Image (cartoon, rainbow, N blue to C red):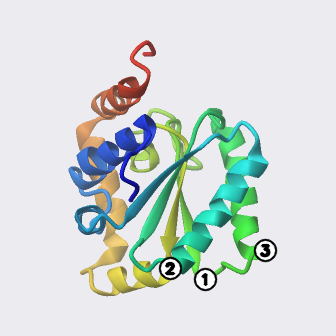
């Protein structure tokens, strides 16, 4: 992890700690946060090519450093529209395959307006993949497989998360994300 984080990366780290870990959305995040093995990178995504180049550069960084378990690539500005983000995600996933990273790294997707296919926009379950900004989570597949192999009943994680988000409710969850975004841009809602 770099010595200094951009304001958006610092707020994203706070989101990992105060949301992902606090609500146990990912049961493996706490360990990586404490080990400081999560890399936070911010890249403008107004132009896709530089953002995609940064994604591949982060793959190469993971190749070179076993001390980094995962990278969160914060994509701002750009990709505020969820449909545009999904188009970008499809290109990013294809690029990983093209660059020979299939089976080595995978992408998890997060966006402030994330909505699962077939779900209602206001379903609190969507907050399992909502974040302060559009981002890609670059994961080592071997690390993920190892963590899942040593976790009891990993297939129950998604349903448990959906239930937890619905208990917390959309209003509370939206307020948490807004508070994090406002740390970077206090003049926005």
Crowding near pointer 3: few (<14 within 10 Å), some, many (20+)? few
The first of marks 2 and 1 along the sequence is 1
3D distance between C-alphas at marks 2 and 1: 6 Å
Using the image as rendered, state which of residue 125 and residue 43 is in the foreground. 43
Q: Are marks 1 and 3 in contact (CB under 8 Å)?
A: no
Q: Residue at x 67, y 48 (%)?
A: 86
The first of marks 3 and 2 along the sequence is 3
Q: Residue furthest front?
A: 3
Q: Secondary structure at mark 1?
A: loop
In the picture of the structure, the residue carrying the numbered disc 1 is: 103
Q: Secondary structure at mark 2?
A: helix
3D distance between C-alphas at marks 1 and 3: 12 Å
Crowding near pointer 1: few (<14 within 10 Å), some, many (20+)? few
Q: Are marks 2 and 1 in contact (CB under 8 Å)?
A: yes
Q: Position of residue 162 (x, y in %)?
A: 34, 52
In the picture of the structure, the residue carrying the numbered disc 2 is: 141
The first of marks 1 and 3 along the sequence is 3
Image mark for residue 69: none
**In which quadrant of the rendered view does residue 169 lie?**
top left
Q: Residue furthest top?
A: 187
């Amino acid at each position: 992890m770099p010595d200094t984080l951009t304001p958006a990366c610092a707020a994203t780290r706070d989101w990992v700690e105060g949301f992902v870990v606090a609500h146990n959305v990912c049961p493996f995040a706490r360990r990586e946060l404490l080990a400081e093995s999560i890399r936070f990178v911010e890249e403008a995504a107004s132009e896709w090519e530089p953002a995609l180049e940064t994604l591949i550069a982060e793959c190469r960084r993971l190749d070179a450093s076993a001390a980094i378990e995962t990278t969160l690539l914060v994509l701002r500005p750009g990709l505020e529209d969820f449909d545009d983000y999904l188009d970008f995600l499809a290109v990013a996933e294809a690029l990983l395959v093209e660059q020979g990273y299939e089976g080595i790294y995978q992408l998890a997707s997060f966006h402030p307006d994330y909505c699962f296919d077939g779900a209602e926009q206001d379903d609190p379950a969507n907050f399992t993949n909502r974040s302060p900004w559009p981002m890609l989570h670059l994961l080592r597949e071997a690390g993920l497989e190892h963590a899942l192999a040593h976790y009891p009943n990993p297939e129950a994680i998604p349903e448990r998360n959906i239930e937890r988000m619905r208990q917390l409710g959309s209003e509370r969850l939206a307020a948490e994300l807004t508070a994090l975004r406002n740390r970077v841009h206090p003049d926005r809602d």
